[in-house]
């Protein structure tokens, strides 16, 4: 049997980024974390890294890419760095979360990075990521996507072409919009429009 070979992915983040994540985890300035193990076998870490690579390699929003990096880096540091840090305890900054939600609802087509949202409410990006998910149940990038898909439904029903909807809502390509729409609703935008038209036709026939 012929060996089919293999492929692998890699990326090289600057060490200053790991120092930043360690500091955000502890809630105070920390030194650069050091990792003694060259190889780590951990399914959860693998999942975080696969999600990060997918977000970096595809047309995901900057908000999601930054969130995936922070999640993967935080998991790596808290579980495997020689500098073991307890995660900063969460408070109940409901007003900050409310402000971020309103900002995303008002600027859904523009989007934002996690750092920009954190600066808006005076918190660190990783801390904001954690308290937002604690309060809302989903991370900021998933909340933004749900807003965009709801807006897409309204525009599609109103007769706006699919390509125009994708552009208006800030999706990088029509195929990316179609993929995210189907992932959230279970049907493509075209199928959604066809179903809505059929429902209207049936109602008029009664």
Image: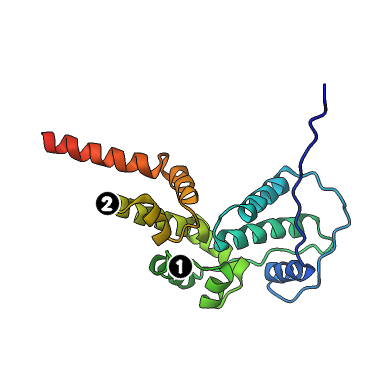
Q: Quadrant of residue 182?
A: top left
The residue shown at (34%, 42%) is 192
**How far from the left and from the top, in percent, is residue 202?**
18, 34
**How far from the left and from the top, in percent, is residue 206?**
10, 34
**How far from the left and from the top, in percent, is residue 91?**
56, 68
Q: What residue would you read off at disc 2?
A: 159
Question: In the visual, does 164 lie left or right of 179?
Answer: left
Q: Which mark is residue 60?
A: none
Q: What residue would you read off at disc 1?
A: 110
**How far from the left and from the top, in percent, is residue 128?**
56, 67
Residue 104 against residue 119 in the figure, above or below? above
Q: Secondary structure at mark 2?
A: loop
Q: Quadrant of residue 186?
A: top left
Q: Residues within 10 Å of mark 1 (few under 14, many from 20)?
A: few
Q: How is the image coloured?
A: rainbow
**Real-space Cα separation, disc 1 to disc 2, in angstroms:** 22 Å
Question: In the visual, does 76 lie left or right of 147?
Answer: right
Residue 147 against residue 5 in the figure, above or below? below
Question: In the visual, does 9 lie left or right of 136?
Answer: right
The residue shown at (76%, 52%) is 10
Q: Secondary structure at mark 1?
A: loop
Q: Looking at the picture, tell me which residue is in the foreground, 147 or 131.
A: 147
């Amino acid at each position: 049997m012929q060996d089919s070979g293999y492929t692998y992915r890699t990326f090289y983040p600057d060490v200053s980024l790991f120092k930043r994540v360690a500091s955000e985890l502890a809630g105070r300035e920390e030194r650069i974390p050091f990792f003694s193990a060259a190889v780590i076998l951990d399914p959860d870490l693998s999942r975080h890294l696969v999600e990060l690579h997918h977000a970096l390699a595809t047309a995901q929003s900057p908000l999601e890419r930054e969130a995936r990096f922070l999640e993967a880096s935080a998991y790596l540091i808290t579980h495997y760095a020689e500098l073991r840090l307890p995660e900063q305890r969460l408070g109940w900054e409901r007003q900050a979360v409310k402000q971020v939600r309103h900002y995303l609802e008002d600027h859904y087509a523009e989007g934002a990075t996690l750092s920009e949202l954190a600066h808006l409410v005076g918190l660190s990006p990783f801390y904001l990521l954690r308290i937002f998910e604690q309060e809302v149940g989903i991370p900021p990038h998933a909340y933004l996507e749900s807003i965009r898909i709801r807006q897409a439904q309204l525009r599609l029903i109103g007769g706006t072409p699919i390509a125009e909807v994708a552009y208006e809502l800030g999706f990088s390509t029509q195929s990316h919009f179609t993929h995210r729409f189907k992932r959230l609703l279970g049907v493509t935008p075209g199928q959604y429009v066809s179903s809505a038209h059929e429902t209207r036709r049936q109602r008029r026939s009664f």
